[in-house]
Image: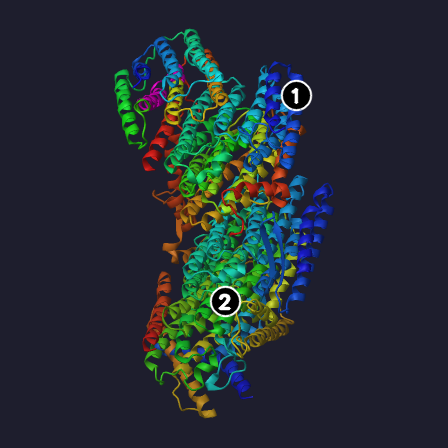
């Protein structure tokens, strides 16, 4: 049952590659809904995996899977109508790869064996490369090349990291299967030196994929050149998978008593990412690149939250959810903008409010949300991470966090207001379409809803995720 | 009853004293000068006349003289003439008093601006600026008095156990205060060396240029207000100078008004002997008086 | 408490209900105002019902399963809630006719929603009793006000102002949250009431951190930079609300934190007092130099925040030196000034809005002679001007007098505190003088004299709803001025739950309120008597009209009148090193001079400093660092290798 | 002492040095094929290696096929299609690269020596070879401009990582299915890189990464 979650899209994805466009679209939609259904079922009923050596339904994975699945359901119909406007010959490849991508991501979310996790994450790179390349422009080519090569190199290093962790297990001289659940139980006996080395490599490896500075370099290129639904998926779902890899190893470190070490590394990378993103968001001429840098920033925030622990853990998990919702919504709105104005340059996108009012609503609300204003959830998560940082005795990190956040807001606010309300252009290439407006707004609405009311099961999933490394909510 | 009487006496006598200034100045110039009661005649003459209003003006123009005069009269309500209890007196009344005078200034300036004349605007600008500085200096004086006497009541300064008087234990400090107050009196009441009420060139005037367009009873109100204001400042200085021991109801009053006459003569002498300052020197002049008081305050800190 | 919560609901409904009925513009606007008014009325009733209750009514719930939200209504809250409930419906009423009718309906709807949200958020800020409730309310307030500032979004200037505002408010909010985080760390509790147990050092750090945040919201120099940009950019009734009520939330936060910490260290009081004096004096000095009417008013908000802080700082000094009278005078003055400033500043912003709406011009030096054309606006504006200048017999004076009394109490203290108190007196005197100079300028230049440039069309008085709002506020100013006793007691009431009164001590204020009332009424009597006399004298007198005497000039024009620039020039120059004057002037060089011109602007030192010391370097460094994203893959792989090397070497 | 493994490792080291010094594409591809073959044989020759199960035999056959034949074959195709013979302007010259390669060997020896884990004689040399290969791969990617060379660098990196894994963990936890998954990823990765290479060539008429520097800030 559990394995079906990723087998299904993998199979249908391969199938779609050969199907005509029209039926491919139907399959995509059906798979998206089915996937959400399956995910929901597995979430609430927690069936045991058939292959416990490789897969498991740990709470962290289920959380990430839920996010992926929900976002995918919103993106799927959008992408169908988006691609229809583009009139692309290679649409079957796009549709197929979307599903393959979904499958590999789900696999990464459910993997319990480190190497299987690695395989799944490397596979996400491969499955998403065609999505970025689908435009076949020079820039898309360049972006894809960088994406594939840098991510492959990075992830290869993560494999090295897992070897070191295995070595740590070997040297402890205990015989347990190589799964995260087994490792966690034996964490105290593992060799700390190799565990540390392993963590460094995993952090750098998956950090590359997650977009932590200074390994983030592929991210703005890939996100800006991919068609918007793909960017939304990359930013909203893929980054979380990479984060999951780091998180699992971090849990292991904490259980092994090395939480201090891994935490400070995460804090360092987190802050660096936020700062780097801030630098590039200031005066950024290309709005999709700006969104991409904002993703880097938010990944940094999540890393920081996990690193500081305490309240920050809960904050980081909330941040993960809300960032996915808001950022994919923003990318979808950006897609409408690309269609409507035919440009990715901020300077040429004035007057969104007048010409594309509903897109503007989504875009501007998304901007407010990502800047940490209520009623969007990032407000809560950033507040908790900030409080958590101080609570656990990282005042300097908290100070830098504040400075970097202000920098990011400075860049983002200026661009967003200019785009929404700047000098009005003359014409719109492709008018707004309700089917392309509803998904981003639905994502936003979900974020608002989750900020107002959190369903009990979701809350329990989050708490059990962070309970593993001692995250509590009451001081 | 005594209070009402002394208040009434002050109201009646106030226009008399500016006549003394004119007389002194005339004597210095070797002339005979106008009669002492000249100001009463002027007022009577103005009250008999009608008024001409500029078409540019609004009700504010008519309100100006009224408020200026009313505030000056109301200010006198708080003053303990010759040590008599004033009509109204409470903790903090000095602040009310000087703010009332501020209100008068506000409306005088507004009325000047209402005419739309560039000269009146110029006078208004100067009045606003110098008035601000003078107000700060006056509050410095209040701080000094508070440090000496611990009272925020105008009547309290000159009555009670520790009256502030130049003959008192801290008389040395008060010399500074008296000098400063006298300088402020000259500044606040448009006397030489800050302003020259007798000049003929509008460009060099402050107060007189602001009331160019007023005529008839309105002008009378302004004049009357100016007399009361001058009277108030002079009375303040006179009360400081008043020697202790002259407590009798009649003798006290007499001594007080004699001292008043001395102050006015001093004004007249100053006016005769000094020339008007350049306009850009006026802030320095007011700041000098401020510095004097400030110095006195510092000394009280030393003593305490 | 229940009533106040009901009020909250009604206020929010006032934003939501009109949304679907935007096609019927009048109906939507009327509903908006009606619901707001009903909400505020309910809230007011709720306040008065709990006014004398000893027990603090509270409410709490859990948010997102874990985050506790707690609300409490104590005396300080009540005092700050009063202006909110009082002003909101009046400002909304003004907005009824002030807002353009030709903008798109959704924009009006969004505006109404944000307006309601802002009011609700302010109510929540004052009610909040723990970290999360406060943070949520505070950020909602930022959000709503940011969107309101953005209302005129077609103008580049508005957008810049809104962005600047967002930046300041977010940075400030993060500072506040960091301060709260510190207190949480020290005490392990989210609840405000527990924070008094934090160690001394933590308290001080937290207070100063929060001071930055609250100060930037309140517009304390030198954190005020957003304020003179945001207020002119926003629609006038929004400026009225923001300046009248919202920035007071910064003061509220500061006071709330101060009382929570229960930290009598005099350094807090001295800081607050010092900041108050700086803001007060420089705020009014800059205001004198500004000629955009709304920007001028914005600087006056800074000045008045300065006065409020002087009052509060003196009160804190009173607590630090165990002087109950000083405490009572200082806080009562500060808190009453909160209400007073809310009244007259909204009134003035409304007046400015009416002028801008009718003349389409906001530069002082181009206006003139409006008193005869807009009599109601003119008279109410004049009332507001007298009030803001702190002159009797209006309300501004009442609060300033209380603060003076507190300061004079402070003169009795020993050491530096006495000097500070003296400085406060002098600062207040200077502020008072400069403020009346500034408002004679505004009233004189805008409303009096003749128009300084030809009017394109005859100017009419503003609409009925706008006039009504202004009249109500003007009457409120007069009321407090003439009948100050209940209001002073009300302001003092704010301290009831916070400062334990010394046992058996007499009323700290003494009989001052009654005497003050007596004095103002006496002045009024003198004034009325004199007016009656004048009326009698003028009976049967010839009164004629004529041109202003030109002192010999035969062809005076309206342009020859004194302008705001020339009026204020000398005063501004007096503050020279702290205020930067930039002059653009082409000197006359030849024998036959050509056309020349002269212009001078006053620039904000803090703004220049911020730009030169912070913004420009950051931009420069950011620009330099852009080569990180160099474009070449070899370099990118190099980063990865380098990172590994560094980490492996370090670890 | 097992001479077989020593020979294999020395060949691997040599292949790394050769690849650093060689400018010809074709030669590089051939070197990679050799290296791939050696890398897939190496674990089998290790002393402590347990007897192979059936699936183990199948796996090693597959690995040999992929690393020594399939991937070099793909590269071979790419090189012929692209029709470039040599790297013209490397960022680091060939002689310098060779020196770097030697330095890498020294560094690897140093690291191996200082790891503080007791390794058998074989494993020590294995680790030296592994780290050198890894570093050589990274160095190739950083110092060459042709896209194909970068792919080759990536392959070397993977070979190196595989060898590290072999050296350190000694197959104690290997599950062949999982290892096969890794291999499959590698294969698909190279295929996709090949497709992109093809497109780069078609778009720019060259596979020089200097053309791929448009996206920057």
Where residue A311 appears, x then y in whole percent? 51, 47
Image position of D9 with respect to A329: above or below: above
**Residue A91 seen anywhere in this rendered image of the structure:** yes
Where residue C442 appears, x then y in whole percent? 52, 56
- Residue farthest to the front, as pictured: D51
Q: Is residue B78 left or right of residue A353?
A: left
What number is the disc on residue A27?
Answer: 1
Where residue A210 appears, x then y in whole percent? 47, 32
Residue C636 image-quadrant placement? top left
What number is the disc on residue B105?
Answer: 2
Residue D217 image-quadrant placement? top left
Range drawn in magenta: D125-152
Determine the main secondary structure of the stretch shown in magenta.
helix
Q: Chain of mark 2?
A: B
> Does the magenta-highlighted stretch encompass residue C149?
no
Where residue D205 appears, x then y in whole percent? 43, 11
Image position of A381 with respect to A31: above or below: below
Nearest the viewer among B190 and C318 is C318
Q: Residues within 10 Å of mark 2 (few under 14, many from 20)?
A: many
Q: Is residue A59 left or right of residue B205?
A: right
What number is the disc on residue A100?
Answer: none
- Mark 1 vs mark 2, foreground winner is 1
């Amino acid at each position: 049952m559990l394995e079906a979650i990723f087998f299904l899209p993998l199979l249908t994805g391969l199938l779609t590659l050969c199907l005509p466009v029209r039926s491919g679209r139907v399959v995509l939609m059906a798979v998206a809904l089915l996937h959400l259904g399956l995910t929901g079922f597995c979430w609430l009923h927690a069936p045991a995996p058939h292959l416990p050596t490789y897969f498991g339904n740990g709470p962290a994975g289920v959380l990430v899977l839920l996010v992926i699945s929900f976002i995918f359901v919103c993106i799927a119909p959008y992408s169908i109508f988006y691609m229809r406007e583009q009139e692309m010959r290679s649409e079957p490849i796009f549709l197929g790869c979307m599903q393959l991508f979904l499958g590999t991501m789900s696999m990464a979310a459910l993997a319990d064996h480190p190497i299987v996790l690695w395989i799944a994450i490397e596979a996400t790179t491969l499955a998403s490369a065609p999505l970025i390349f689908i435009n076949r422009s020079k820039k898309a080519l360049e972006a894809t090349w960088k994406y594939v090569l840098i991510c492959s190199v990075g992830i290869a290093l993560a494999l090295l990291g897992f070897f070191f962790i295995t070595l740590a297990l070997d040297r402890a001289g205990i015989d347990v299967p190589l799964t995260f659940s087994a490792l966690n139980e034996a964490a105290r006996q593992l060799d700390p030196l190799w565990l540390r080395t392993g963590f460094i490599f995993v952090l750098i490896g998956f950090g590359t994929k997650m977009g932590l500075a200074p390994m983030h370099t592929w991210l703005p290129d890939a996100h800006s050149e991919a068609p918007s639904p793909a960017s939304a998926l990359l930013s909203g779902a893929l980054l979380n998978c990479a984060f999951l890899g780091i998180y699992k190893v971090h849990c292991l470190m904490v259980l092994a008593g090395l939480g201090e070490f891994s935490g400070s590394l995460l804090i360092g990378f987190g802050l660096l990412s936020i700062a780097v993103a801030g630098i590039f968001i200031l005066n950024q001429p290309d709005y999709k690149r700006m969104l991409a840098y904002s993703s880097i920033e938010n990944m940094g925030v999540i890393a920081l939250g996990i690193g500081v622990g305490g309240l920050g853990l809960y904050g980081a998990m909330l941040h993960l959810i809300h960032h996915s919702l808001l950022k994919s919504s923003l990318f979808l709105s950006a897609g409408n903008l690309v269609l409507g104005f035919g440009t990715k340059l901020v300077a040429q996108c004035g007057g969104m409010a007048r010409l594309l009012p509903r897109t503007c609503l989504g875009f501007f609300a998304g901007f407010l949300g990502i800047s940490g204003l209520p009623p969007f959830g990032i407000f809560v998560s950033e507040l908790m991470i900030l409080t958590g940082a101080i609570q656990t005795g990282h005042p300097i990190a908290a100070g830098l966090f504040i400075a970097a956040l202000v920098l990011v807001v400075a860049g983002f606010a200026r661009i967003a207001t200019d785009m929404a309300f700047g000098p009005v252009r003359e014409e719109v290439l492709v008018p707004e379409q309700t089917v392309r407006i509803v998904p981003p707004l639905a994502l936003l609405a979900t974020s608002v809803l989750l900020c107002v009311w959190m369903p009990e099961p979701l809350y329990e999933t989050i708490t059990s995720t962070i309970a593993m490394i001692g995250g509590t909510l009451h001081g | 009853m005594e209070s009402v009487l002394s208040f009434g006496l002050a109201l009646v006598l106030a226009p008399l004293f500016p006549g003394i200034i004119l007389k002194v100045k005339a004597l210095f110039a070797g002339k005979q000068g106008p009669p002492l009661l000249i100001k009463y005649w002027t007022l009577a003459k103005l009250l008999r006349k009608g008024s001409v209003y500029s078409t540019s003006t609004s009700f504010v123009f008519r309100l100006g003289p009224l408020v200026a005069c009313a505030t000056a009269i109301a200010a006198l309500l708080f003053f303990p003439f010759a040590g008599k209890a004033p009509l109204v007196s409470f903790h903090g009344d000095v602040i009310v008093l000087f703010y009332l005078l501020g209100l008068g200034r506000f409306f005088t300036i507004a009325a000047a601006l209402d005419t739309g004349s560039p000269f009146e605007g110029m006078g208004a600008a100067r009045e606003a600026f110098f008035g601000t500085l003078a107000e700060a200096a006056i509050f410095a004086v209040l701080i000094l008095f508070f440090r000496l006497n611990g009272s925020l009541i105008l009547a309290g300064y000159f009555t009670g156990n520790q009256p502030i008087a130049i003959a008192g234990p801290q008389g040395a400090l008060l010399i500074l205060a008296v000098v400063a107050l006298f300088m402020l009196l000259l500044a606040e009441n448009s006397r030489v060396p800050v302003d020259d009420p007798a000049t003929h060139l509008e460009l060099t005037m402050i107060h007189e240029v602001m009331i160019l367009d007023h005529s008839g009873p309105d002008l009378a109100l302004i004049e009357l207000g100016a007399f009361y204001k001058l009277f108030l400042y002079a009375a303040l200085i006179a009360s400081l100078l008043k020697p202790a021991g002259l407590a009798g109801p009649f003798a006290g009053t007499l001594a007080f008004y004699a001292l008043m006459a001395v102050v006015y003569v001093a004004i007249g002498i100053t006016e005769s002997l000094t020339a008007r300052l350049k306009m850009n020197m006026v802030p320095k002049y007011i700041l000098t008086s401020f510095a004097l008081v400030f110095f006195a305050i510092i000394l009280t800190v030393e003593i305490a | 408490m229940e009533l106040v919560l009901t009020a909250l609901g009604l206020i929010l409904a006032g934003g939501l209900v009109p949304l679907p009925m935007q096609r019927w513009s009048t109906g939507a606007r009327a509903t908006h105002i009606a619901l707001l008014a009903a909400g505020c009325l309910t809230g007011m009733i709720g306040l008065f019902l709990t006014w004398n209750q000893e027990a603090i009514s509270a409410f709490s719930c859990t948010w997102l399963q874990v985050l506790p939200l707690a609300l409490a209504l104590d005396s300080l809250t009540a005092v700050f809630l009063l202006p909110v409930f009082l002003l909101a419906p009046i400002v909304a009423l003004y907005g009824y006719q002030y807002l353009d009718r030709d903008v798109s309906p959704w924009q009006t709807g969004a505006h109404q929603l944000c307006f309601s949200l802002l009011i609700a958020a302010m109510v929540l800020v004052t009610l909040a009793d723990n970290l999360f409730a406060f943070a949520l309310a505070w950020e909602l307030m930022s959000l709503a006000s940011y969107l309101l500032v953005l209302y005129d979004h077609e103008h580049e200037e508005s957008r810049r102002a809104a962005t600047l505002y967002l930046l300041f408010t977010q940075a400030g909010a993060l500072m506040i949250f960091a301060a709260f985080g510190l207190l949480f760390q020290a005490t392990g509790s989210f609840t405000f009431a527990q924070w008094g147990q934090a160690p001394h050092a933590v308290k001080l750090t937290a207070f100063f951190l929060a001071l930055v945040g609250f100060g930037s919201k309140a517009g304390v120099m030198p954190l005020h930079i957003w304020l003179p940009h945001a207020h002119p950019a926003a629609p006038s009734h929004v400026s009225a609300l923001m300046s009248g009520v919202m920035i007071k939330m910064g003061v509220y936060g500061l006071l709330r934190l101060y009382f929570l910490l229960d930290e009598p260290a005099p350094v807090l009081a001295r800081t607050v007092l010092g900041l108050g004096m700086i803001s007060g004096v420089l705020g009014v000095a800059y205001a004198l130099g500004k000629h955009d009417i709304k920007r001028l008013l914005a600087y006056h908000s800074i000045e008045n925040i300065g006065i409020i802080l002087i009052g509060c700082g003196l009160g804190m000094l009173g607590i630090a030196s165990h002087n109950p009278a000083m405490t009572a005078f200082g806080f009562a003055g500060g808190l009453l000034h909160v209400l007073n400033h809310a009244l007259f500043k909204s009134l003035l912003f409304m007046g400015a809005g009416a002028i801008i709406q009718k003349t389409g011009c906001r530069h002082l030096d181009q206006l003139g002679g409006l008193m005869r054309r807009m009599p109601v606006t003119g008279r109410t504006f004049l009332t507001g001007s007298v009030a803001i200048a702190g002159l009797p017999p209006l309300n501004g004076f009442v609060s300033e007098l209380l603060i003076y009394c507190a300061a004079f109490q402070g003169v009795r203290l020993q050491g530096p505190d006495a000097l500070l108190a003296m400085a406060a007196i002098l600062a207040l005197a200077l502020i008072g003088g400069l403020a009346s100079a500034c408002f004679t300028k505004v009233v004189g230049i805008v409303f009096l004299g003749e128009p300084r440039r030809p009017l394109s069309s005859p100017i009419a008085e503003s609409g009925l709803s706008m006039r009504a709002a202004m009249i109500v506020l003007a009457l409120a100013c007069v009321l407090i001025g003439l009948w100050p006793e209940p209001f002073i007691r009300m302001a003092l009431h704010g301290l009831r739950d916070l400062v334990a009164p010394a046992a058996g001590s007499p009323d700290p204020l003494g009989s001052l309120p009654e005497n003050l009332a007596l004095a103002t009424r006496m002045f009024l009597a003198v004034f009325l008597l004199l007016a009656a006399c004048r009326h009698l004298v003028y009976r049967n007198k010839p009164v004629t009209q004529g041109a202003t005497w030109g002192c010999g000039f035969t062809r005076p024009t309206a342009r020859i009148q004194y302008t705001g620039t020339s009026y204020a020039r000398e005063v501004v120059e007096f503050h020279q090193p702290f205020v930067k004057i930039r002059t653009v002037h082409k000197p006359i060089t030849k024998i036959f001079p050509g056309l020349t011109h002269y212009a001078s602007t006053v620039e904000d030192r803090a703004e220049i400093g911020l730009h030169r010391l912070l913004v420009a370097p950051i931009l420069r460094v950011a620009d330099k660092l852009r080569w990180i994203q160099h474009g070449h893959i070899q370099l990118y792989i190099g980063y990865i290798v380098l990172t590994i090397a560094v980490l492996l070497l370090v670890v | 002492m097992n001479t077989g493994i020593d020979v294999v490792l020395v060949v691997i080291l040599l292949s790394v040095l050769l690849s650093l010094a060689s400018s010809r594409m074709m030669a590089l591809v051939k070197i990679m094929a050799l290296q791939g073959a050696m890398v897939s044989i190496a674990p089998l020759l290790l002393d402590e290696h347990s007897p192979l199960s059936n699936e183990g035999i199948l796996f090693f056959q597959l690995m040999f096929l992929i690393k020594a034949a399939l991937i070099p074959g793909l590269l071979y195709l790419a090189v012929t299609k692209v029709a470039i013979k040599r790297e013209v302007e490397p960022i680091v010259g060939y002689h310098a690269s060779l020196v770097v390669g030697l330095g890498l060997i020294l560094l690897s020896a140093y690291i191996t020596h200082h790891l503080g884990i007791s390794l058998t004689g074989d494993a020590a040399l294995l680790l030296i070879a592994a780290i050198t290969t890894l570093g050589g791969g990274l160095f190739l990617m950083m110092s060459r401009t042709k896209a194909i060379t970068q792919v080759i660098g990536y392959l070397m990196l993977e070979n190196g990582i595989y060898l590290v894994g072999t050296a350190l963990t000694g197959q104690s936890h290997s599950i062949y299915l999982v290892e096969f998954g890794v291999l499959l990823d590698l294969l698909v990765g190279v295929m996709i890189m090949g497709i992109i290479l093809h497109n780069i060539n078609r778009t720019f008429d060259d596979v020089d990464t200097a053309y791929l520097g448009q996206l920057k800030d």
